[in-house]
Image (cartoon, rainbow, N blue to C red):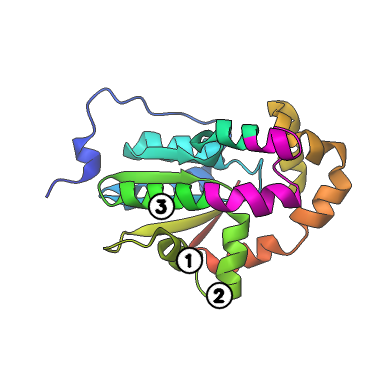
Amino acid sequence: MRSWRNRVSYGTVVFVSTQFGPVTDAALRETAKRLDEPGAVVFCGFPGAGKSTAARYLASLSGAVILDKDRFAPEVEESVMGVLTHPHDRDSDVYKSVVAPHIYTGLIRTGLRVAAKCPVVLDAPFLSTIQQASNHGTSLRERLCAIADLDEPVPVTTIWIDSAHADIRTRMHDRGFERDAGKLADWDAYRTGVLDSGLRELACSVVDLVIAN
């Protein structure tokens, strides 16, 4: 059987990133080989860690479809949160309890069902799913597959994109997204409550790979 990569049309443009060092670039190129056939690579990490850049690069190497949480159902998130708090709130307990669980369930189920037919890259923080995996004593891969409730197993590789706090803050500032405004406005609280909350250590214990960026 010919690999999926061999079925990608000629003339495919490869996204070139100057952000990655040689070690990170090599790790992503090696990961792309996992998408020679249908399956999923799942990028997780803190906002601003560089997940989306890694996802675009991996997709350009493999021909995979990207499902990005920020582009999955933004109108739903903004309209609901506009009623409950404000449209770009992604950090409050209200968002985390009312909206996020359903967005993530939809993203995971859609992504892994598509991955049964073609290569997929999933791009989202997955912080709550990482916590769930740890609470259940399972890997993140196992937790994702349980949520997806698939009829047949699908190859899934989970990757934590690791990044220094200073780099995360710089990326948030430079990209200027409204959803980052609250984090940047009270950076010390965000750093203490999220970045230094122990989630990174949990993530590294439940994912398949950790790639520094």
The kind of residue on which mark 3 rests is Arg
Q: Are marks 1 and 3 in contact (CB under 8 Å)?
A: no
The stretch of residues the image draws in magenta is: 80-103
Residue 42: x percent and y percent? Answer: 46, 51
Nearer-N-terminus badge (2/3): 3
Q: CA distance from mark 2 to mark 3?
A: 19 Å
Dot placed on the residue nearer the N-terminal end, 2 or 1: 2
**Secondary structure category for the residue under label 3:** helix
The numbered disc on residue 136 is 2
Q: Is residue 78 above or below residue 13?
A: below
**Which residue is painted at 47% across and 57% down in the image?**
158
Q: Name the element at disc 1.
A: helix
Instruction: Please report the residue visible at 72 percent of the width from the left and 49 percent of the height from the top.
Output: 94
Determine the secondary structure under disc 2: helix
The answer to whether residue 161 of the structure is visible from this angle is no
Query: Where does the image place residue 152, in percent across and percent down from the top left?
Result: 26, 63
Residue 67 visible in the displayed image: yes
- Mark in the foreground, 1 or 3: 3
Q: Are marks 2 and 1 in contact (CB under 8 Å)?
A: yes
Query: In whole angstroms, how far apart are the C-alphas of marks 1 and 3?
Result: 12 Å
Q: Which residue is mark 1?
A: 143
Q: Residues within 10 Å of mark 2 (few under 14, many from 20)?
A: few
Q: Which residue is mark 3?
A: 109
Q: Are discs 2 and 3 less than 8 Å apart at CB?
A: no
Asked whether, in this view, residue 186 is left or right of residue 101, the answer is right
Does the segment drawn in magenta span residue 125?
no
Is residue 154 positioned above or below 80 on the image? below
